[in-house]
Amino acid sequence: MRFLTLSFIALLFAGCAGYHIGPVRPKFMTGVETIAVPNFKNETLIPRVEVLMAGAVEQQIQLDGTYKIANSDRADAVLEGKIVEIRRNSARSVHGDVLTAREYRLTVRIEYKVTKRSTGEQLAHRTVTGDTSFFVDPDLAGDVISDERQAIPLATKQAAINLVSQIAEGW
């Protein structure tokens, strides 16, 4: 009876041998618990979007909870990024007028790299995109530029979600 009880307890604990509590970081981010996010570089013609992007990435890192935000001099790694492209494409035209667009697709493309602060070793270097759609009412002579400006925060937020997913989950 004692042998049967011990066998049952051993099987019970053996089933959980591979699990552990807490964030599971990807292999390339081993040893990184804190990360610094300085302002991104902006290679587009849209002003001040680099601060918006860095803020969106910091917010997503905090929401994800895998890493903690720290200053550049105290962090285990530094995430540097640059906004390479912000592109607007027409997605849907006005019925009866194919030259006038009603819906646009806005895409933000970002290149980033994660560097280990202590050694200078580059842990990751990838490209990520974020996109959203926005509508313009052609009957009201909608201003495409101002509507695009309102859609940029949504696209940067989506890019930040994709970026943090890559560094926190490895994909």
Image (cartoon, grey):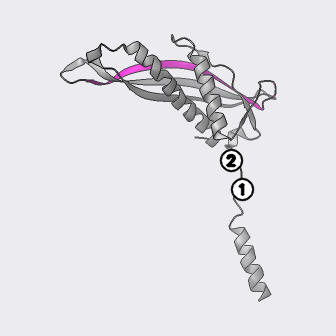
Q: Residue 67 location, x and y as percent? A: 71, 38
Please tell me which residue is depicted at 43% across the width and 23% down the height of the picture: 106
Please tell me which residue is depicted at 71% across the width and 54% down the height of the picture: 21
Question: Which residue is under mark 1?
Answer: 20
State the image quarter where residue 75 is shown.
top right
Q: Name which residue type carries label 2.
A: Val
Secondary structure, mark 2, is: loop
Which residue is situated farthest in the left direction here?
A: 96
Q: Name which residue type carries label 1.
A: His
Q: Residues within 10 Å of mark 1 (few under 14, many from 20)?
A: few
- Front-lying residue, 72 or 62: 62
Q: Which stretch appears magenta?
A: 73-93
State the image quarter where residue 4 is shown.
bottom right
Q: Left of 137 or right of it: where is 124?
A: right
User: Compared with residue 121, is residue 136 higher up or lower down, i.e. above or below?
Assistant: above
- Front-lying residue, 123 or 102: 102
Q: Is 166 covered by the magenta stretch?
A: no
Q: Residue 80 location, x and y as percent? A: 66, 23
State the image quarter where residue 68 is shown.
top right
Question: Which residue is under mark 2?
Answer: 24
Q: CA distance from mark 2 to mark 1?
A: 9 Å
Q: Is 82 covered by the magenta stretch?
A: yes
Q: Residues within 10 Å of mark 2 (few under 14, many from 20)?
A: few
Secondary structure, mark 1, is: loop
Q: Residue 60 location, x and y as percent? A: 61, 34
Q: Left of 61 or right of it: where is 90?
A: left
Q: Residue 166 location, x and y as percent? A: 60, 37
Q: Which mark is residue 110?
A: none
Please tell me which residue is depicted at 40% across the width and 27% down the height of the picture: 133
Please tell me which residue is depicted at 54% across the width and 18% down the height of the picture: 84
Does the magenta stretch mainly form a helix, a strand or a loop? strand
